Image (cartoon, rainbow, N blue to C red):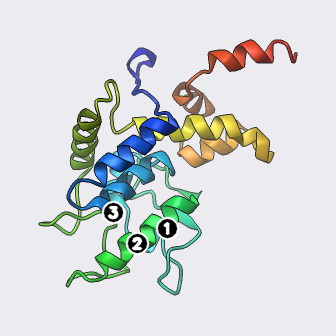
Amino acid sequence: MALGKQAKTLTKKQTDQLLWYVSTLRSPVRNQVIVMLSVKAGLRAKEIAGLTWSMITDADGDIGASIHLTDKASKGRSGRVIPMNAQLRQKLKEHLETEQKRHNFDLATSHVITTERASKTSSQAIVNMFSSWFAGVGLVGCSSHSGRRTFITNAAKKISTVGGSLRDVQALAGHSSLAVTQRYIEGDVDARAKVVDLV
């Protein structure tokens, strides 16, 4: 993806605005889960569409502490384990309660994201949803990749505060190289201005 054409990252206010907007539409909890899987877990559209309940539940069938994304659900060999964000975990619990009422629900095989007519969805459908939602809230230059870029940028900004490094962000993102991860990270002009006084 060319640097000049990258999807815009989202501020907290824009993320909150998007979460509110999708909650006013049909399937509000499912919609919020889709947004959070992008912004709070950094999943690609393909990964959101391919995610099954078995990848996020524990042996008791409860929402686990991590997302165990398989290579099959991901891009190439970028399957990975992503610790679960607390807000996302709570929203997934809510979503699971609803999905368990579907007549063909199976915890071992059912997909997390379904539609009224189908037991799973496609990556293109996820891309289209984001496009429609961003248009609905008036956010220009955003796409299904905006949430993922936001997650990676936010993780990069905060990883050193918990003793980690960009290598940890690379692992969370499922990138094959650190250079790819660095291209995703939105720069901060203010931070650059402040850090020179600390050198």
Front residue of 70/168: it is 168
Q: Residues within 10 Å of mark 2 (few under 14, many from 20)?
A: some
Circle 3 sits on which residue? 29
Front residue of 119/92: it is 92
Label 1–label 2 contact, CB within 8 A: yes
Q: Which of the numbered marks, if any, corresponds to residue 67? A: none
Q: Give the residue at x 71% y 42%.
A: 159
Q: Which of marks 3 and 1 is nearer the N terminus?
A: 3
Q: Return the x and y of residue 67 as percentages of the image width and height.
A: 52, 63
Q: Give the residue at x 57% y 62%.
A: 86
At label 3, which amino acid type do we have? Val
At label 1, which amino acid type do we have? Gln
Q: Which of the numbered marks, if any, corresponds to residue 94? A: 2
Q: Which residue lies furthest to the left in this view?
A: 117
**SS assignment at label 3:** helix
**SS assignment at label 2:** helix
Residue 33 position (above or below residue 151): below
Front residue of 69/119: it is 119
| Measured Cα–Cα span from mark 3 to mark 1 | 11 Å
Q: Is residue 56 visible?
A: yes
Q: Give the residue at x 34% y 66%.
A: 112
Q: Which of the numbered marks, if any, corresponds to residue 90? A: 1
| Measured Cα–Cα span from mark 2 to mark 3 | 7 Å
Q: Return the x and y of residue 106 as percentages of the image width and height.
A: 31, 82
Q: Return the x and y of residue 3 as percentages of the image width and height.
A: 45, 18
Q: How crowded is mark 3: few (under 14 residues within 10 Å), some or many (20 or more)?
A: many
At label 2, which amino acid type do we have? Glu
Q: Which of marks 2 and 3 is nearer the N terminus?
A: 3
Left or right of 138, for residue 62:
right
Q: Give the residue at x 36% y 70%.
A: 95
The quarter of the rendered structure image containing the C terminus is: top right
